[in-house]
Amino acid sequence: MTYDPDNIFSKIIAGTIPSHKVYEDEDTLAFMDVMPQAPGHLLVIPKSGSRNLLDADPTTLSKLMPVVQKLAVAAKDAFDADGVFIAQFNEPAAGQTVFHLHFHVIPRHEGQPLKP
Ligand code: 5GP
């Protein structure tokens, strides 16, 4: 499987589609999920093109993962959560719908179900 730059997150990076950005640096962007599974659900993506974790290069991941961690801590604090769910899907069979690597960061509260 190859990376197709004609995807919605590529357009968010380019600024041709709006998003609610919560973090940005030279290599990484984070923004709120348009259909949150719980309050504070955000997505962290590399600016470089990887289809998913299966084709991501180590350099991309080494820049991305510290941001995932930083935003997980920040989201837990900001939403006064009990924990943080990190999710990442690879290929349609595993539930991936947008084919640009992304990590879901979802603050979680005790006893609060995720939306179906
Ligand atoms: P996945 O590919 O891991 O299944 O999920 C893709 C995620 O991207 C979904 O949670 C969906 O709500 C989110 N999403 C899809 N299109 C947009 C968009 O245009 N803007 C934002 N902010 N999120 C989106």
Image: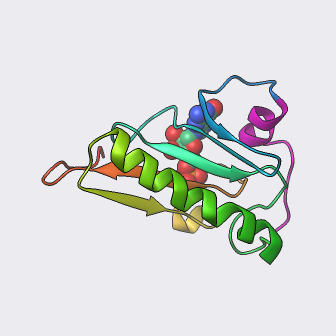
> Residue, x 84% and y 59% (percent of image)?
3
> Residue, x 76% and y 61% (percent of image)?
51
> Residue, x 43% and y 55% (percent of image)?
73
Say whether residue 17 is left or right of residue 72: right
Task: Say above or below: 65 vs 75.
Answer: below
Ligand 1 shows up in the quarter that is top right
Say whether residue 76 is left or right of residue 27: left
Between 63 and 104, the residue placed more toward the observer is 63
Between 113 and 20, the residue placed more toward the observer is 20
Where does the image place residue 74, in percent across and percent down from the top left? 45, 47
Task: Determine the image quadrant of residue 110.
Answer: bottom left
Say whether residue 106 is left or right of residue 13: left
Asked if the stretch drawn in magenta spans residue 20, the answer is: no
Where does the image place residue 104, in percent across and percent down from the top left? 51, 53
Say whether residue 38 is left or right of residue 19: left
Q: Bounds of the magenta span?
A: 1-14
